[in-house]
Amino acid sequence: MKKTATIAALYVLIACCFPADYFAQESPLSKQDTSLISAIHAFHSRFGTGKIILKDRSIIKKVIVHEIYPYWIIYKKDGSLHDLLIEEIDKIEIGKNKQRVIVFDENNKTIIY
């Protein structure tokens, strides 16, 4: 009984300290640019899959970029979703003949060529 009262008091304390919508807000880290994602999906529709070239020169082939966040991307390979830190990526090439190339600047801003 004492444990239940302590937990209830903790909930009341938390509710008093934070605005009602505080926990419903999105973190800035979880926001993505939907117009950018729409453009990248259009590139994949037009040019096919891509490949991710990492800074260590390894290559991840036959990928589709699914989402881009401020510090990581989510891509689809063989029907499964995977995530990867942007700091590990050198560039992303979309299309068999590199029709589009995605790079990230030092602030992780997406640049498409």
Image: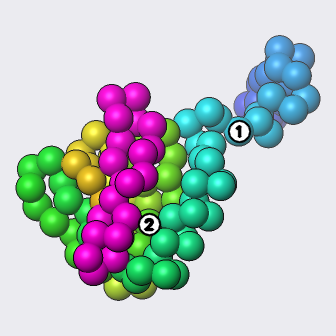
40 displayed left or right of 97: right
Residue closest to the eye, 25 or 90 = 90
The residue indicated by pointer 2 is 65
Q: Position of residue 65 (x, y in %)?
A: 44, 66
Would you call the spot at circle 1 few (<14 residues within 10 Å), some (14-19), or many (20 or more)?
A: few
Residue drawn where x is 90% and y is 29% of the image: 20
Which of 19 and 36 lies nearest the eye of the viewer? 36
**Toward the viewer: 81 or 90?**
90
- Mark 1 or mark 2: which comes first in sequence? 1
Q: In this figure, which residue is indicated by the disc labeled 1?
A: 26
Q: Residue furthest top?
A: 17
Q: For mark 2, does the 10 Å Cα neighbourhood hold few (<14), some (14 to 19), or many (20 or more) residues?
A: many
Q: Quadrant of the N terminus?
A: top right
Disc 2 element: strand
Distance from label 1 to label 2 (Cα)?
Answer: 22 Å
What numbered label is drawn on residue 105? Answer: none
Q: Give the residue at x 38% y 54%.
A: 113
Magenta stretch: includes residue 51? no
Q: Amino acid at mark 2?
A: Val
Describe residue 87's horizontal placement relative to residue 18 as left or right.
left
**Residue at 40% across / 82% down in the picture?**
48
Asked if the magenta segment contains residue 103, the reply would be yes
Report the coloring of the rendering: rainbow
Q: Residue 83 placed where, x, y %?
A: 38, 58
Quadrant of residue 10 within the rendered picture: top right
- In this view, 44 is above or below 7: below
Dots 1, 2 in contact, CB < 8 A: no
Magenta span: 93-113
User: Which residue is nearer to you in this view: 99 or 104?
Assistant: 99
Residue 63 in view in this figure: no
Q: Secondary structure at mark 1?
A: loop
